Image (cartoon, grey):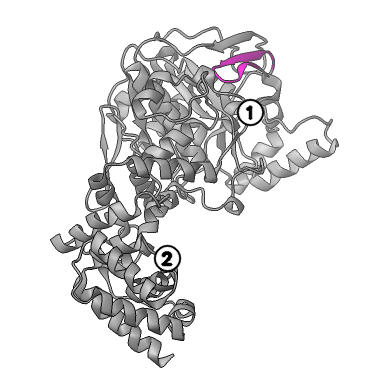
Amino acid sequence: MSDAVPDLATTGAAAAATTERGTATTPDGPLRLRFCPAPSGWLHVGSVRAALYNWLVARRSGGTFVFRIEDTDAERATLDSARSMTEALAWMGLDWDEGPVLAADGTLGSRGAHGPYLQSERAALYAAVGRRLVDAGHLYPDLRTPAELEAWREQHRSGTAGGGPPVVKRSTAAHSEEELARYAEEGRVASWRLATPEAGSITVVDLVRGPVTFEWAHVSDPVLLRSDGSATYPLANVVDDVAMGIDLVCRGEDLLSVTPRQILLADLLVADGLIDAALAEVGLPPRDAAWGPPRAWAHLPMVVGMDRKKLSKRHGSVAIQEFRRQGFLPETLRNHLALLGWSHPAGEERFDDADLTARFALEDVGRSAAAFDVEKLTTFNGERIRALNPAELADRLLPHLDGTEGEAALVGRPPSDAELAVVRGLVPLVQERMQRLDEVEAYAAPFLGDVGYDEAAVAKHLATDAGRAALDAAAAALDGCTWDEGALEAALRAAAEGLGVGFGKLAQPVRVAVTGTTVSPPLFGTLVLIGRERTLARLDAARTLAAGG
């Protein structure tokens, strides 16, 4: 990249230039891309889809994926949220080359040559940049209170001030001498706005949207410095994109409208070395000499529910942390999220990371809202679970059995050798049945703990004359039986035949007796894994329970 700045419409009221920025295709060469959430909650599906797309483009280009946490909004940003987002992105497998690092004690450090990567630790830089922008005449003061500003906007909405959209410009925000005198007496402190052109236009060539033209007269001047001197998102975001050498900005379509003023500000930062002087002043790493403003933009379609409405709690949880707790595999989520807006020309839908990296292109992302289908995601997940190596699946089940993911702890952390053997023995019994990893808890409880009997199952299958007879026959048949699936099946089928009933009439009482419920893995494998001693003991206990019924 070059520091050369196109002849963008100059700030103030005079300019009326028409300019074009951006590219119709992804730039060549290694690219620097970033993911920069605000830590004010959980990491949601739409945000992670954007992170994935940035990660894929960075990896395909042989470039750099930067993770930055934009916590300039002190009222909403929390350290807990920043930690949670860092953990979630790592769990998703979207490894970053530069960004925050979560230490064992819960603190967040930085990895990379152009940090720190928490904006709260870069306040001195924003102040230095803001001061230089003021001195250069690119910012102007606005002394209006929020209430006064809202009243002004309402006047424009109602048409009492000439009609038209309530666009804030230097010409509309200028204060009279009387106002300035009154504000001085009140001790008001100004916020500072970026002066955008009063006329002219700019066309942003977007990789997803194509050319999009903005009339400067309809672009409001953003506040860059609050009245307390702190930086707002519009300043910090652009300063960091330039200081960190971001080549391509890929984000949600809701931010398309702010792109013109961000382009303008990025150009101003590079012109005359403003950003470089500020970095040097505060002792932060210098900007690479080849870095200029971002060269390309891609604004992604909204992610909606299957009802085509914006994702919300009515669609169930959309937080990545919840999908982790429910036992979705990160590779399933990566595959599924990649398809929310992008599709392969051949219609393929099953990809591993290497396939996605090789085939994904922002130019192939559609413009229409993408529907997030949890049922399809669940089907994908079941397929991937069934394709896992049994030993790997056993390892992935452990966090759902040791309490890590919030379920009741059925094994230790780490598990004992005996517990691990049970989990590994359980995998062949349940792998074909599972669609989510968290389902293992319901299956595993009888193998790793005591039996808790379902009252309805006891009433239906044990506490009846037929149930009691089945338990007696099963206990007799299994006493002294060789303990393998073939021998157990032969013995129990013979017992059912001796009673003159179908096998199911004997199998269900036995299932309830040894697992406490009517739902379990295949019965004969279940008995083998539970073991002779515990099986016979549970049959005796169930006979006692049935007798009381």
Q: Dot 1 corresponds to which residue? A: 368
Mark 2: secondary structure: loop
Left or right of 20: which side holds 446? Answer: left
Distance between mark 2 and mark 1 Cα atoms? 43 Å
Task: Give above or below for 74 relative to 465.
Answer: above
User: Does residue 225 belong to the magenta stretch?
Assistant: no
Percent position of residue 108, x then y: 28, 45
Left or right of 163: which side holds 522? Answer: left
The residue nearer to you, when weighing 494 against 269, is: 494
Mark 1: secondary structure: loop
Percent position of residue 98, x then y: 30, 31
Residue furthest to the left in view is 417
Residue flagged by tag 1: what amino acid is it? Ser
Name the image quarter holding residue 184.
top right
Task: Give above or below for 194 relative to 89.
Answer: above
Task: Give above or below for 528 relative to 102.
Answer: below
Q: Dot 2 corresponds to which residue? A: 519
